[in-house]
Amino acid sequence: MSGTRDSAITRARAAFTGGQYLDGLRRLVAVPTESQNPARSGELQRYCAEIIPALIEGMGFSGGVVANPLPGRGPALITERREGEGLPTVLVYGHGDVVRGMEDRWSDGLDPWSVTIRDGKWYGRGTADNKGQHLIAIEALRAVLQERGRLGFNTVLLIETGEEVGSPGLREIARDHCTAFHPDVFIGLDGPRQSTHVPELRLGCRGGVAFDLRVRLRDRAHHSGHWGGVLADPAVLLAHALASIIGENGRILVEGWTPQTIPEGVRRACANLIFEDLPGLPEPDAWWGEPGLTKAERIFGWTSAVVLAGLTGFPDAPANAVQAEAKLRMQVRHTVDVAGADIIPALRRHLDARGHRHVEIVPVQEREMFAASRTDPDDPWIVALAESLTRSTGQAPNLVPNSSGGNPSAIFAEELGVPVAWVPNGHAGSNQHAPDEHALEPLLREGLALMAGVWWDLGAGLHPPLRNRRDRKGRAA
């Protein structure tokens, strides 16, 4: 068999129109893989051991479930289709876990554990994040196999079950189980696009650091009439410290928290981004943040710092007292141009230099947050993937230097030494992580065509020359 690219794309679209894709999605969504719920650990195991293997049966994959090295964390499925030496090896990623179902908060007639179609929206937990997306990758692989009789490259399929809790144990799994495959590129399908009308490539993510700022001056509160104006107020001290961290127009004032400069390739990618204004999304405040930067540069090329919560006293029942303590939680999101390990030390130096020695910094772990990562927009693999998407749509994709949210890009870039690319097929209004999560029918259908084109092109040799099979730690393959 040989076939054609157009015929492979037609096959992928037929999987959608003929109901094959929907049948598969219904089987995936029906498994309540809530990684935040310890009671669902058996479902995470079943997803990897039974559900996905049944879906790819007959496609020539071999492999199995890999236990998580961290106690109480979900497993991963790692399975390979190997076609020969001298061919590129593509690591295809997805995550089978979802956030909590929130069953009692969905609209009438909708159920998080079943797929319901209304007005072009496919409702169900995981339809957008991420079951519907890694199913696109699988069905597109199937279409190319059926058309060409082979893929033309080696494939490693990795489905993890802990992404929604920060991918605990995934670094060890990648290091211990994926290094031996010597992949040449990582391709994942996850996240929303900037525009429903423009295909997209994402090249990493911003990292996150969370901490509490706390001022604790005494063991208890004291009467405000007797002690106001005499005892220092911890909330006021904390407010002044916060004002020294973020200016009144949102500019970050801590030295070391922001990049020295935005790399030229990142600026170029940001300049070409096409955004889509969707109903219900807020309008950016043009006066807030780093002056002189565009919206795209502020989101994808710069650091952001926000206050997530704050507390002093008892807000629901205020007492007439000078409080003993005040605290707030902050989160800093940073690009790979800023070292995450330097965020808190830089803040300590900043506060001390301004006399805010009463302010304590307490590192916290909201969850296991992702490290920052970014593949060079000019990397030959990124160029090849962008050309493939353009070939399929006639339109150059949005090239997003790094996701504004989190994903495990850094794990694969650091442990495997490969370029990392994401091809998202969600949209900003999908309600992922909320009730009524849904995917858009046109994006699912287009995603199948886009990925069939990508898989076809890689198998046709439209990829960069392969480097020596040597991992980044220097061990020969």
Image (spheres, grey):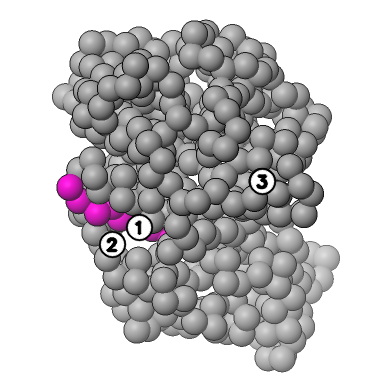
Q: Which amino acid is tagged 1?
A: Leu
Please, what secondary structure does the residue beneath circle 2 have?
Answer: loop
Mark 1 or 2 closer to N-term?
2
Q: Which amino acid is tagged 2?
A: Leu
Q: Which residues are magenta?
A: 394-402
User: Mark 1 = which residue?
Assistant: 399
Mark whose residue sits in front, 3 or 2: 3
x then y, percent, for residue 352: 74, 86
Drawn side of residue 208 relative to residue 227, left or right: left
Q: Residue at x 43, y 62 (%)?
A: 377
Drawn side of residue 27 relative to residue 237, left or right: left
What kind of secondary structure does the magenta stretch mostly adopt?
loop
Question: As displayed, is residue 41 above or below residue 369?
Answer: above
Which label was assigned to residue 469?
Answer: 3
- Does residue 130 show up? yes
Q: CA distance from mark 3 to mark 1?
A: 28 Å
